Image (tube, grey):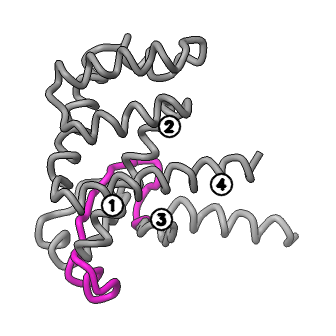
Amino acid sequence: MATDSLNNNELCRRYALALFSIGEKKKEIEKYVENFKVLYSTKNKHNELNDFFNNPLLTTKKKVVVLDKISKKLKFQKLFSNFLKVVAKHNRLSQLDTINNHFDEIIQTKNNKINVEIVTSIKISKDINNKLVKKLENLTKKKVNLENKIDQNILGGIIIKIGSIMIDSSLRTKLEKCKFSMKGKG
């Protein structure tokens, strides 16, 4: 099962890389990013579009025809529309979110940027945010886009997620470690 997930993830990365390569040659990367935004905005407004993307019972031929109509209606670039059709022909529309995530990562890497997610129990101030961005930029040597998520369940402290690296310095985790170490005593 883990191998299938890894293979699907790698396959999605390859689709994203192919789209990026085409977009870079045609100088249409920003247009593709905008096309993805329009597509996701439309998907969020219309649940039937989500159902369409995830329906394994529809034939690929039917999905390609519908995607052609959607692409024309939403005024997608021809190559982006063709890309969606290729994804549909290979029964991968349900993985379009993952493909889009990889596409965004490739763009960020190319632009020497990185997304960093921090989780805190309360929203951090602008001053702390700016200091954290500077520290993380020094650490990663990349332009940092910092996103602060709030989770009151961590009680205090901070969790930092940089790509696949997670630094958990939350109070909840520290208490759980303490509780675990105390189980062996007494």
In the picture, residue 157 is in which quadrant? bottom left
Q: Earlier in the sequence, mark 4 or mark 2?
A: 4
- Looking at the rendered structure, the secondary structure element under dot 1 is helix
- The N terminus, quarter of image: top right
| Residue indicated by mark 3 | 170
**Looking at the picture, which amino acid does disc 1 mark?**
Ser
Near-viewer residue (140 or 186): 140
* CB under 8 Å between discs 2 and 1: no
Judged by depth in the image, the label closer to the viewer, 2 or 3, is: 2
- Looking at the rendered structure, the secondary structure element under dot 2 is helix
Judged by depth in the image, the label closer to the viewer, 3 or 4, is: 4
- Tell me the distance, in whole angstroms, between the alpha carbons under discs 3 and 4: 29 Å
Residue 137 at what x, y percent from top left? Answer: 25, 82
Residue at left offset 67%, top offset 69%: 178
| Residue indicated by mark 4 | 6
**Looking at the picture, which amino acid does disc 3 mark?**
Ser
Q: Which mark is residue 125?
A: none
**Looking at the picture, which amino acid does disc 4 mark?**
Leu
Q: Which residues are magenta?
A: 132-159
Residue 186 at what x, y percent from top left? Answer: 87, 70
- Looking at the rendered structure, the secondary structure element under dot 4 is helix
- Tell me the distance, in whole angstroms, between the alpha carbons under discs 2 and 1: 19 Å
Q: Which mark is residue 21?
A: 1
Judged by depth in the image, the label closer to the viewer, 1 or 4, is: 1
- Looking at the rendered structure, the secondary structure element under dot 3 is strand
| Residue indicated by mark 2 | 95
Residue 7 at what x, y percent from top left? Answer: 66, 52
- Tell me the distance, in whole angstroms, between the alpha carbons under discs 2 and 3: 33 Å
Residue at left offset 25%, top offset 64%: 146
